[in-house]
Image (cartoon, coloured by chain):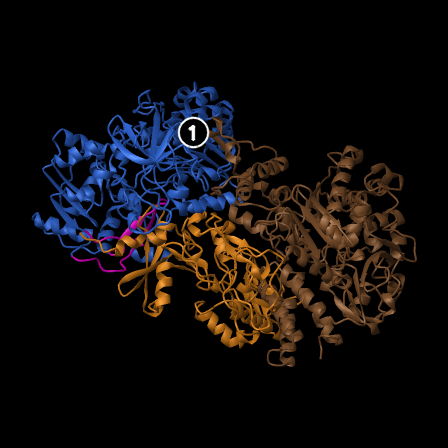
Amino acid sequence: MTITSESVSTVSARVDGTEIEIPEGATVLDACRQAGADIPTLCYGPTMTAANACRVCVVEIEGSRTLVPSCSRKLEDGMEITTGSDRARHSRRLVMELLGSASELDRAGERLDRWMTEAGAQPERFGAPGPESPREAPAPGHHHPADPKFAATVAEPAKVEDDLYVRDYGRCILCYRCVDACGVEHQNTFAIAVAGRGFDARISTEFDVILPDSACVYCGNCIAVCPTGALAGKIEWDMREAGTWDESSQEVTRTVCSYCGVGCNLDLHTQDGRIVSVTSPHDHDVTLGNLCIKGRFGWMYVSSGRGV
Amino acid sequence: MDIRALLAGPTDVERAAVDDLLGPPESGWEGGHFTGLDGHVAYGGHAARERRNLLLPALHAVQDAAGSVSKGALGYISERLTVPPAEAYGVATFYALINTGSRSQTLIHVCDDIVCARNGADELKRSLEHELGPPGAIDPGRSWTPSPCLGQCDRAPAALIHSAGAGYRNLAPVEAAALTNLDFEELPTGLIHQGREELRLLHRIGHVDPESLDSYRSSGGYAGLAKTIDMGREGLIAALDQSGLKGRGGAAFPIGIKWRGVADAQDDVKFVIANGDESEPGTFKDRILMEGDPFAVIEAMTIAGFATGATRGFAYVRGEYPVAERRLVHAIDEARKAGLLGPDVAGAGFEFEIEVRRGAGAYICGEETALFASIEGERGEPRQKPPFPTEKGVFAKPTSVNNIETLVAVLAVLEMGAAEFAAVGTERSTGPKLFCISGDVTRPGLYEVPFGTSLRQLMTLAGGVRDGAGVGAVLVGGAAGSFVDAGNLDMELTFEGSAAAQTGLGSGAVIVFDDTTDFGPVLRRIAQFFRDESCGQCVPCRIGTVRQEESLARLTADRPLGGIAEERQRLEDLARVMTDASICGLGQTAASAVQSAFRLGLPGVAR
Amino acid sequence: MFGAGGGTSSYQEMEDTDLIVMWGSNAREAHPIFFHHVLKAINRGARMFAVDPRRTSTAAWADVWLGIDVGSDIALSNTLAWEIIKSDLYHEHFVAHATSSFDEYVESVEHWTLERGQEVTGVPADAIKQLAHEYATAPTAQLCWTLGITEHHNATDNVLALINLALLCGHVGRYGSGVVPIRGQNNVQGGGDMGALPNRLPGFQLVADPDLRGKFEKAWGTTIPHRPGKHISLMHEAMDEGELRALYVIGENPLQSEADAQQMERRLTGLDFMVVQDLFLTATAEIADVVLPAAGWGEVEGTFTSSERRVQRVRRAIDPPGEARDDLELMSMVARAMGHDWPTPTAEEAWDELRSLSPIHGGMAYERLDESGGLQWPCPTEDHPGTLFLHGRLWEEETGPKAPFSVVDWVPPVDALSEEFPLRLTTGRRLDSYNTGVQSGRYPSPRRIHGVLDLSPEDAEALGVHGGELVRVVSRRGNLEAPVRLDRSLRPGLAFMAVHFPDDTDVNQLTIDAWDPKSGTAEFKATAVRIETLVST
C-alpha cells in the first residue's frame, strides 16, 4: 500500500508467515483480512466497538496463553499471528457448533453456512435440540437440572407485538449487537438490554414488557445489525414465513430519505416492483446504517395504493 | 438521558430505602415533588449519568427493605440515577441475591455445594422441602432456595437467611430446627488453626476486638502505615519487590510490579480495590480476615493508596458476608474519625478514602474486570484484556486490584522486613500462605503455613481424613482447580509445585474427599456451578458449560450419546474451546476439575 | 447567513465539538439521525445545553435545560451577550478582526442584566450565567436551532440574535464551531439552492443584481423581472387584497399547514383558479380547480440538499402509479400547453444546466455525487472536494466583508396572554409523524399519538380534567375539541399540540398568522388559549 501522509504511522506483523504492514490503530482482524485470511465473524460489526462475545474470530498469537479475539485486539508491532492452527480452528469450529446447537441459524446468511461447512461444524453432535421453553425471568444462578434427552436451546415463540417488528429470539445468538445499537453505540435509547445470566441470559425490555410498552422508538437500528434474522421487519418476517422472500430477485436502489432535512441515505429493496424493506448503508457517514422510524418504515405511503 | 420510566411508582418503603441511600431527590426531574423552578430549569447530563455506579447499592437497599425489587422501585431507581429501566433490569437480573419477582418475607439460601453436600446438605434440603415445599414456592412467611458455596465450609452445612427489613444472617452449621424458628445467635468468626510457625497473617484474629481501633493499634496496627510513610513510595515498592510477594487470589502476580504499574500510570484519578468477593467453592480465608481483622484490610488499602497515588479505594465484599461488610464499614468510620482516612491521612499529606461495595450473588464478580463492571453499575461481565487494569481499570482509570489476603500479607512484609518475608517458603513462592481445608477431614478450618508445606503435611495438621477413612482425592483450588489423587499427596504447596502436579493453588481451597466418594455427583455439582455462574457473555462458556453439564448428566445416567468414548471426546472438545477461547478465567477453568477427574480415573466418572 | 443560506457546519463537526446548544430544537424526535451525531459528542464528553419551553427528549440529554417562556429567545440571547461582555469572556480578537457594529451591539444589550433576563425568560439567573460562561469559554461550540426559533413573528430577529452570540465568542468559521439551522424538510435547503426564494436566483444569486440576472436571461432566452417576488405571507396579503387571483401549488397542503386555517380557507376558495400538483388528493387538492397527479419519492430522479449543504442523489426504484408523472414532465407539459416549446429534460440535464449557472454547485457532476456519497457546497469546480464549513475567511488575514452584529430588540409574542386566554399553546412535531401527516399517516406506527392536547399535570388538575378527557380549546380565532394527554415535559401555563392531525384536531384553527416581515414565517409557536371542559349530559 502507499502511505501518502507522513502522519500515518504503521505497524508490521506476520500473519501465517506473511509480513503485513498496516496503519496504526488497526485490529488483528484487519491484518488477517489484509493477508487474505477468511476469518469468520458474527458479533463484530464494522460501525461498532467490538463486543467480543462470540469468539468465532479467535486466532493464535505467539506469547498469548489463550486464543485472541481478532476483532477487538489492537495490532501490535511484531505480532506473530497464526490463523489456521489446529487450536484456532478447533475453537472456531466449536463456537459455531455450540451456536448451532442452541439457536436456529437458518436465516444467518450464506457466509455462516459456508464457514460452518468449511470448518466441518456439526451442531447436532450435542444431542437432539430441546423444545421451546419460556425464557423470561428464571432466577439467576439457578436452572432446571440438565435433561439427558436433549441439548438445551433458546427456542421460544416469536414475539409479534406490533405491526413493524418481529423478535424471534429462537434465532438469537446473544451477540450484543442489537443492545449496543439501541444503546451507546448508536441510538442511545436503551430500550433493550441483556437480562438474566449465563445460558438464561436473553435480550429483554425492563421486566420483559412488550415492546410497545417499552422505551423502543422503532428506529429499527437493532434490526439493521442483527446477524441471524432474530430481529426483522414484520414485512420481511411475514414473507420469509410464507416462503415468498426472494433475495436473489431483489434490487437495491440508493436514495435519500423523503422526510426531514438530515439527508439520510436509504437503500430501497424492491421485489416484483414493490418496496419490501428499507435499510441504510453502514459505510455512509451520515447514518452509519442507522435510521429513525420514519426513514425505516415511513416509506409505506409510496406503495399504499394512493388514488390520485 | 431521555428515559421512559415505568408507570408504576414505588411504595413508601421502597422510596424511603432509596432516599436513605441517595438522599432526598433534588428536583421533580429526579423523582421528587415538582416545584415552579423545575418548570424552568433542569440539571442532568453528565453529572446525572455519573451516578450510575450507585445502581447496585440502590438495588440492595430496596431488596433489603422490601425483599424484592418491584417495577415501581426499579422505575424510581432509574429516575433517581438516570439509568434506563431496561439496563437496570438487566443488572438486577444478573445477581442471585436480587429478586425481581414476588418473594417471601424470609428467604433461606441453603448451600448444597460440594463441601456442604458431604456434611448433610441433602438431608437439610429434604427437610425444608417437606416443610416449605419446593425451592421457589412462595409462602408469605418463609421460603428457601439452594445456593452455591456460602464460604462457611469450615462449619458446613451452611445457610444464609435474608429477612426483608432485617438484613442477612449467616448460619452454620445448620440445625434444621433453627431454620424453623429463625432464632439463632450470630456466628463468631470461623475457626482458625495454627501451623508449625508463628502466625504472621492470622495473629490478631481472635485476639483483637475487630470493632476497636484502639485494640488494633495496641497490637501493632498502623505501624505498617507509619513505616510506609517513612520509606516513601519507592522504598515501599522496592521492599515489596524484594519480598517476592505474589497475589494470593489465584493469579500469583507480583504485587510490586502491579503497584508500580499504577504508580507510573499518567492519570489524575486512580483507584485501589480490595477484592473481597471470595466465592470460590471451598474458600473462606478472606471472610475470616475481613471479619476478624478488618482494620488490617483498611490499613493495607491505605498503604496501597500511598504507594500507587490512588486517592479512592473500594472494598468489594461478597454479598453473602454480612458480618465482614458491617465490620469493614465500621472500621472505615473509625479510621476516618482518627484521621487515618480522609484528605490528609495520618498528617502525612496524602488523601485516601474507602467505600465498601457489596456483591450480590455472582461468582464472576471476583474476576477483576467483572468487578469493575459491577462497581460501575453494569452487569458483572468481564472485559477483554488488554488493556490491563493498571492502565484502564474501574471507571477506565488505572486501578490496582488486590486480594484480601495479599493486602494483609503486605502488612506482614512491613512487620517482618522484606528479607525475612522472602526467607519464608521457597524461592519462587515466598512468605506464609493461608489454606482453607474442608470436606472429609477431622478439623476443617483455616491454616496458615509457610509456602512449601506439602499437601500431606497440611492434611495432617487438619487431623487427617475423618473417621479413619482413606483419601479418595483432594480438590485443590476449588471448583476451578484440579483433583489430586492419593498418590500425589506429597506435592509441595507452592505455585511451581502445584503447576508440576497439573493443578493450581487458586484461592487456597483444599477439599478432601474420602475413599468412599462417588465423584459423579461431585462433578455434576461442579458443572452445575459453572453453568449457573457463567455470565453468559461469550459463547464457549455460555453454551459450553451447558453442554458439559448435559454430557456429564448423560454419562452418570449411563445414557452416553454415541458411546462413552464419544462422550469423553465431546467433553474434551468442550474443555479445549472453553479453556482456549473464553474471555475470562471462569470459562477458562470451567472444565479443569472435570478433566482432571477423568485423567485420574476417579470412581463414578470413568468406567 | 452573511449572504449564503445554509448552516455553517458539518455533522462530523458535531461529533468533534466541545459544546452544543440546542435552541428551540427537539432534534431527538424531529431530526433523530442528526441527534446521533450530537450523542456521539455527548458520549465523548462534550457539554450540551438545551433552550426550549418544554423539557423535550432532546432537553433530557442536556447538562442544563433552560426552560424559557415562549417567545423570550431574544431576551435570553441579549442577557447571555451582556453576561459574556461584562465578564470579559468575548473573543476580542475575532470581534475586532472580523465583525462590525460591535459598539452599537454592546449598547443595545447593556440593560440585559441577569436579573432582567430571569424576569423575562423565567430561567433562573445562575443557569443563564452558566450557559454564558460555558459557551464563551468552550474551545469550540455549535449553536443549533430549528422551528422554535423561526416560527415566530420576529423569526429573523431571533436568528440574528443567535448569530450575534456566535460572533461575540468567535464560534463561527472554524472547524468545530458554527451556527446550524437544522432543516425540517428533505429538500428545503435544496429548494433555496434552486432559487425557490422570492429574491434569489439559483445558487442564492440576487435577482436585483443586473449582472447575475443577465447571466440567467442569456441562458434562458427570456427576461426576468427585476423586482423580488412575494414570500408566502405577502402572497396571503395579496390574496386578501384581490391582487393574487390564481395559485399553482406543488407538493404543499396550505389549507392545513398554514396558520389561522379558517382565514386560509377563505383565501383559497376566493381564488379564481388553483392548480394542485401532488402525490395525494390532499385537503387543498380537494378544493382545487385542476389536480395534476405527480410521481413521488422513490419514483423519480434528482437531488436533495441536506442541512449540512450536502447534495445527494435521489433515485427511482419503482414505477409511479397510474397516470402520475414526474414534476419535471408535468411542468414541461404545462409550459407546452401554454405555448412554449419546452422539451422534457432528464433530471441530470436539468442539474447540469443549474451547474452551469450556479457557481457553488459548479463542480457537482452526477458522477461525482455517485462516487462520493454527496458533496457539500460550495463546490465550484470538478476538482474541488466540497466545503466542510463556511466562513473560514473570517479568520484569514483578508476577511472580506465583515460580519455585522445586529441590534435586535425583544418583543413579546403577538397573541398576548390574558385573563380570558391564560394558557400559552405551542406546537411541534412528534417522532413518528411529519407535517400534516400526508405521508407519515400511512404506516402503522406503534408510537402514534393521535391529535391530543398536551397539558401539564398541574394544569390538568387545576382544570379538573383527566387524561383522555375531551376538552374544547379556544383561541381568539377559533376552537377545536381534543382529548387531554398529561405531559410532564410541560410546566403549568404551557400547553402543546402536534401539527400532524389536521383532520381530527386542526391546530391551525387556533394559531395566529402574525408573520415575520423579513421571512414571511407565521407565529405558529405562540398562541393564547383557554381550555373549556365539556359537560357531559
Instruction: Give the image quarter of residue B356.
Output: top right
Q: Which chain is blue?
A: C
Residue B176: percent from left, percent from top: 74, 55
**Which residue in the protein does label 1 denote?**
C458
Answer yes or no: is residue C364 visible.
no
Q: Which element type, helix, strand or loop, lies under badge 1?
A: helix
Q: Which residues are magenta?
A: C294-322
Q: Which residue is most to the left? A: C339
Q: Which chain is orange?
A: A
Main SS, magenta residues: loop
Residue at image x 40%, y 26%? C462
Report the chain shown in brown.
Answer: B
Relative depth, front residue between B470 and C230: B470
Q: Position of residue C66 (x, y in %)?
A: 46, 31
Q: Is residue C82 magenta?
A: no
Q: Amino acid at mark 1?
A: Glu
Picture coordinates of residue C351 (x, y %)? Answer: 25, 52
C40 on left or right of B155: left
Local crowd size for mark 1, using a 10 Å CA cut-off: few (<14), some (14–19), many (≥20): some
For this view, does B240 lie left or right of residue B29?
Answer: right
